[in-house]
């Protein structure tokens, strides 16, 4: 049978594709555990500089596979701790940039996944729905953390309470994505963007990601302390020397030499 996650690597960009297109890539346990394992492997692989998560077919991810819930031998709490929570923690903890390339509808935990990327690129026909309240569940997989930080408490509550669909123009305006590209050229645009990111200093970006994630939960004093600590790690790294040397020589830096 078809693998639930497709993996390919091109020019330092590893693309992980959710592959249950008939169900708009609704997530079963195999998909979630495989995706988390693939992300961990990408983190360890020196060939990989940027990870892209996207969906096969017309959907990005329709959230939990609702055909896969009845008869399971885990409580909701156990299930989230076993599947979704490690996935979201892995994305945010990975010291490489993760792009969520939202090619179509992102619903429920799929919406959380769409929001979890460091960079979020949308196709023209992408959309996001905090669909949980339609089935009287609580937003999970980080939606309650991501969304109010992006749009404020009140808009987050309204989106969650009414489960209204957000399209690309509203997503741009609300800060739910960085760029929107036409459907026809979406996959090429994503690859081009990812390759641009892959040319940046990977070690420094990993530290930047760590600092930003910590800052979302810290005071200014704590952020200043962490910056001072991480700047030492950045400044001691060959990337910094390369950047300064290239500046002096009036040439482009080469951060891909490792
Ligand atoms: O531990 C736990 O389990 C708790 C975790 C919860 C996390 C969650 O994500 S809860 C939320 C679960 N997701 C949903 O409730 C979304 C359900 N789907 C929809 O509301 C709609 O499908 C969409 C708005 C996403 C898209 O609508 P539309 O009209 O573009 O497509 P469609 O026709 O509804 O769906 C196409 C097919 O995908 C269809 O199958 P069919 O009829 O062609 O054989 C549909 O049943 C299937 N599909 C869509 N979403 C799911 C799904 N199958 C299983 N599970 C789904 N979530």
Image: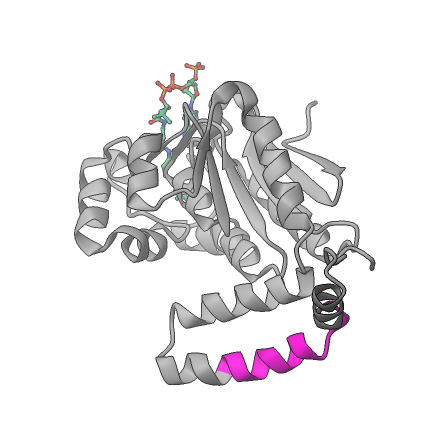
Look at 39% across and 67% down and name the residue there.
Answer: 216
Q: Which residue is painted at 77% across and 55% down in the image?
A: 256
Compared to residue 202, the image places residue 67 above or below, namely above
**For residue 203, which quarter of the picture?**
bottom right
Q: Which of 169/107 is in front?
A: 169
Q: Residue at x 20, y 55 (%)?
A: 153
Does 231 lie within the magenta span?
A: yes
Q: Position of residue 204 (x, y in %)?
A: 63, 66
Residue stretch in magenta: 226-239
Q: Nearer the viewer, residue 55 or 224?
A: 224
Left or right for 22, reference 157: right
Image quarter where the C terminus lies is: bottom right
36 horizontally vs 49: left or right? left
Residue, x 74% and y 45% (percent of image)?
12
Does residue 200 appear in the picture of this structure? yes
Q: Is residue 220 magenta?
A: no
Task: Name the quadrant containing residue 55.
Answer: top right
Q: If the picture is divided into quarters, which one holds ligand 1?
A: top left
């Amino acid at each position: 049978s078809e693998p639930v996650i497709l993996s390919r690597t091109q020019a330092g960009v590893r693309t992980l594709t959710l592959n249950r297109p008939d169900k708009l890539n609704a997530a079963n346990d195999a998909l979630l555990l495989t995706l988390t394992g693939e992300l961990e492997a990408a983190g360890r692989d020196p060939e990989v500089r940027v990870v892209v998560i996207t969906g096969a077919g017309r959907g990005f991810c329709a959230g939990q596979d609702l055909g896969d819930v009845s008869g399971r031998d885990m409580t909701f709490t156990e299930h989230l701790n076993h599947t979704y929570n490690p996935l979201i923690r892995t994305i945010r903890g990975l010291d490489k940039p993760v792009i969520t390339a939202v090619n179509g509808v992102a619903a429920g935990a799929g919406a959380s996944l769409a929001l979890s990327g460091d960079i979020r690129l949308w196709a023209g026909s992408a959309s996001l729905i905090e669909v949980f309240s339609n089935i009287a569940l609580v937003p999970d997989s980080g939606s309650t953390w991501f969304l109010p930080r992006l749009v404020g408490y009140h808009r987050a509550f309204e989106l969650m309470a009414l489960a209204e669909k957000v399209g690309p123009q509203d997503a741009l305006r609300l800060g739910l994505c960085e760029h929107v590209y036409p459907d026809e050229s979406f996959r090429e645009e994503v690859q081009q963007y990812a390759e641009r990111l892959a040319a940046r200093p990977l070690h420094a970006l990993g530290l930047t990601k760590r600092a930003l994630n910590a800052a979302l939960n810290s005071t200014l004093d704590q952020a200043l302390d962490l910056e001072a600590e991480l700047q030492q790690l950045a400044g001691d790294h060959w990337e910094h020397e390369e950047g300064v040397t290239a500046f002096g020589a009036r040439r482009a830096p080469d951060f891909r030499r490792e």
